[in-house]
Amino acid sequence: MLLADIENNSLNRLSRYREGLRVFAALDEQRRISADMLRMAAASIGQFANEAVKHGAEEIHLFATSAVRDASNADEFAQAIFDETGLVLTICSGDTEAELSFLGATRGCPSGMIDIGGGSTEIVIGDANAINTGMSLQMGAVRLFRMFPVADSVSAQQVIDYARSLLAPHKEKYLAYPAKEWIGVGGTFTTSAAFVQRKPWDDRTNTHGFRLSLNDVLAAIDMLAPMPLEDRVKLPFLQPQRADIIVHGLCILAGCMQELDLSEMIVSEHGNLEGYLKKHYLDNTNL
């Protein structure tokens, strides 16, 4: 949850709250969100809504992305949340999710953006005036974790190759656009920034704006892919809740960077939450 003030056509970020529920991981073979996850998500959202009201929020918006978009019982999920909180859930399309992340993370100049989530990855290029190309690909860190076991550099390379294969049919549209910078959004990027700098994972200093190189990403994969999970969770610069899926996120990132010929990316802590507020409350998005 992002709590923000909107004043004088400006977005002032006040505080951010996060709870990692992994809704995508709760999808069964019929693509149904489990009953336990319905209850957990509704309870968490209710707590967030109460926190927002306590801090003076006048309006509360609620939207869902890839995991709920994929679910066959998305309506049941939305109803459970409404029954618990009274909030109406908007389920974003892949195109909308890509647009929101781009608006939230970029600064107006011709830019590219990659947002790696649990179920999907959004890749967008454009500027303050318009999005040139944007799409949502069915490769997220949790999704590929469930599809491809990784125990060494060889199996990690298979995940990289898979990510490249999904992006390859579309890459020429991105390569043709003169992006001045590429921005990275999502937990894979912020976790990688801490990992590369060998700083505690919950230390947010020097995360936003950190320049993450392809060499850094490949070195992290080489180190983490063969490492048992019980050893990964002990690393002070790796968020324990991401220890199981971080290699898959890094492989998606490496595949995207290799396919788009990117030597580095700029890590952003801003994303679709900021983009949602910009789109709905500001006269323009060039911030």
Image (cartoon, helix red, strand yellow):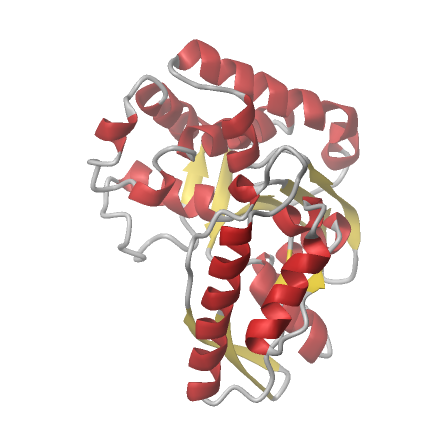
Residue 70 x %, y %: 69, 44
Note whether 285 is above or below 106 in the view shown.
below
Residue 109 x %, y %: 66, 56
Q: Observer-nearest residue: 102 or 227?
A: 227
Residue 280 x %, y %: 71, 75
Quarter holding residue 189: top left
Q: Observer-nearest residue: 38 or 281?
A: 38
Q: Observer-nearest residue: 108 or 275?
A: 275
Q: Residue at x 57, y 57 (%)?
A: 105
Q: On the picture, is 73 further left or further right than 228?
A: right
Residue 219 x %, y %: 36, 23
Res. 32 in view: yes
Q: Observer-nearest residue: 214 or 155?
A: 155
Q: On the picture, is 80 further left or further right than 198?
A: right
Name the quadrant of the C terminus. bottom right
Q: On the picture, is 126 further left or further right than 157?
A: right
Note whether 165 is above or below 101 in the view shown.
above
Q: Residue at x 42, y 23 (%)?
A: 218
